[in-house]
Image (cartoon, rainbow, N blue to C red):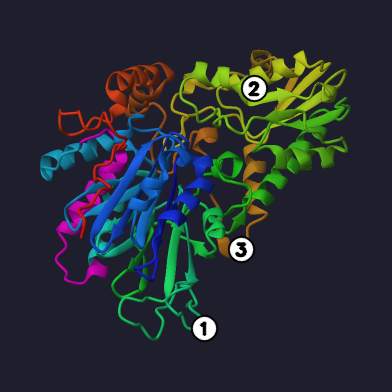
Amino acid sequence: MCGIVGLLLADENVFVNQMLFDGLTVLQHRGQDAAGIVTAERGRLHLRKENGLVKDVFQTHHMLDLRGNLGLGHVRYPTAGSSSCAEAQPLYTNFPYGICVAHNGNLTNTDELAEHIRTNNRRHLNTDSDSEMLLNVFAEYLTAAESDNMVESVFNAVSGVMKKCKGGYAGMYLINGVGLVGFRDPHGIRPMVFGTRKSPTANAEKENNFDASGVPKTPSKLKDSETKLDYVMASESVAIDTLGFDLVRDIKAGEAIFVDMNTGKCHTRICATGASKAPCIFEYVYFARPDSIMDGVSVYETRLKMGEKLADKIIKKYPEHDIDVVIPIPDTSRTSALQAAYRLNRPFREGFIKNRYIARTFIMPGQETRKKSVRLKLNTIKSEFAGKNVLLVDDSIVRGTTAHEIIDMARDAGAKKVYFTSAAPPIRYPNIYGIDIPTRQELVAYERTEDEISKHIGCDWIVYQDLEDLEESIKCVAKPEDDLTQFDTSCFSGTYVTGESIGDSYFNKLYDLRNDDAKQEKLKKTEQSNDGCESMSNDKRESSLKDEGCEGLHNKVAAR
């Protein structure tokens, strides 16, 4: 899972660097492994990317170099490829035009794509990242475009990408001198929204800037390069809110939006045949911020409903329960826990205090790292546990490592009994669309009943949300026009909307590449290779004296 943001400003004398930084900062929860920004300034591209948090990757001197009114930003949480900063995004290819990509999700036919790119196109793939394949396939189709109409060429290229690439993905292309393209896979598995504002420096006219379908209209008068409207695209609506833009809508399943920087026109088209929306349900459970609007639905309101339905199941299963207090596992489960407590008529209390400077444990690579980080991340308020029967509410349980440690902490704090609940159903299958749930054997619910799970993690009993109730928690909040009738529930149900089946060779490959032992081996190799940040040149005398990150395009440009 990653976070992406793209901006095109009407005034080419106004730079996007600070807004991209701010947008990535509010999307930091989607990935803490690496961050990158690329900007376009009158035909010149500037790129900075490196492993680390947004605040650490971009220092003042980097920001000063990231000039231009068009740009992409990316925060990474790795599921495909490695943690090398060479695979940090955005990624770049110089032909045609100079194209950069920022991508969220996973492609599932990478072997086939890599063979096609290397053999048929004679293009070089420098990393194992599926994002590089997404970039090269788009470049291939844009190069082969027979039309002089750039709008048709762009949409035809995106159509080619959607025919060729399988999986769950949302992304953006920055085409140097051309514009900004945002797109979403044919099932809309990964999220993407877009918004606009009247340019504060381009004297936008006071008029209704949207047509009946919610597409920004081109203002009736243009002055040279001034396009009147600024555009933003992002993984979540919180980035649009933070930047002071108005949310227009979600990009539809199989849709592409192209903003032409030369004309100021915004074009949209469904580029996939048979597109059918099935967004990832785990976004609502865990990944998205509660203040986001996703596919027209408030994430916060869905989590309230999850808490209600979870409490109803507890009452049905344990009508004579002896719960004294309801305590959330910070932070994602807080909303569901609050509503569950209200429904159960029990007090809601904060029993764990979170160290906000520790990354999300589910995202952390390696089982031992996750286990160690739990007690660094959380500490108990002992008075809320001492002598009480506590109900702990978490958003989900993946490997069980965090749950086991938290239950031990509750008992150490003096709890008489510890009950555990999950706002999501048991996770029993791998996720192949961009979430780090790659192997069934590492999942605590794999081939275990609820009683066996409760014994394994050390609680007195456990209650999971039913999948039907989870889906209904979202559907009941959605408006009829949101068209939310199905979801990707593969990690709960084992049904994959793109057609893969458990037991396929693809899943064996995933296990070999992405189990915890394999990840630790990759980390060792990365440490031995200077974190993957070697220069193309063998001469490292200059790079040892200053921090250049791992830009493929250096921020330094010749004086003009």
Nearer to me, 519 or 226:
226
404 to the left or right of 58: right
Q: Are marks 1 and 2 in contact (CB under 8 Å)?
A: no
364 versus 473 height, above or below: above
Res. 400 in view: no
Res. 538 in view: yes
Task: Give the residues drawn in magenta, as a range.
Answer: 126-152
Which residue corresponds to the image point at 42% horizontal and 43% vertical from the top-left? 59
Where does label 1 land, which residue?
206
Position of the C terminus, as image quadrant, is bottom left
Dot 2 falls on a residue whose secondary structure is helix
Other-residue count near label 2 (Cα within 10 Å), few / some / many at <14 / 14–19 / ≥20:
many
Where does label 3 land, which residue?
480
- Give x and y (percent) for residue 545: 27, 31
346 to the left or right of 55: right
**For the stretch drawn in magenta, what is the main secondary structure?**
helix
Task: Say whether residue 457 is magenta.
Answer: no
Dot 3 falls on a residue whose secondary structure is helix
- Give x and y (percent) for residue 117: 17, 42
The amino acid at mark 2 is Ala
Q: Which mark sits nearer the N-terminus, 1 or 2? A: 1
Which residue corresponds to the image point at 14% horizontal and 43% vertical from the top-left? 123
Q: Which mark sits nearer the N-terminus, 3 or 1? A: 1
Dot 1 falls on a residue whose secondary structure is loop
Label disc, if present, on residue 403 of the rendered structure: 2
Other-residue count near label 3 (Cα within 10 Å), few / some / many at <14 / 14–19 / ≥20:
few
Depth check, mark 1 against mark 2: the one in front is 1
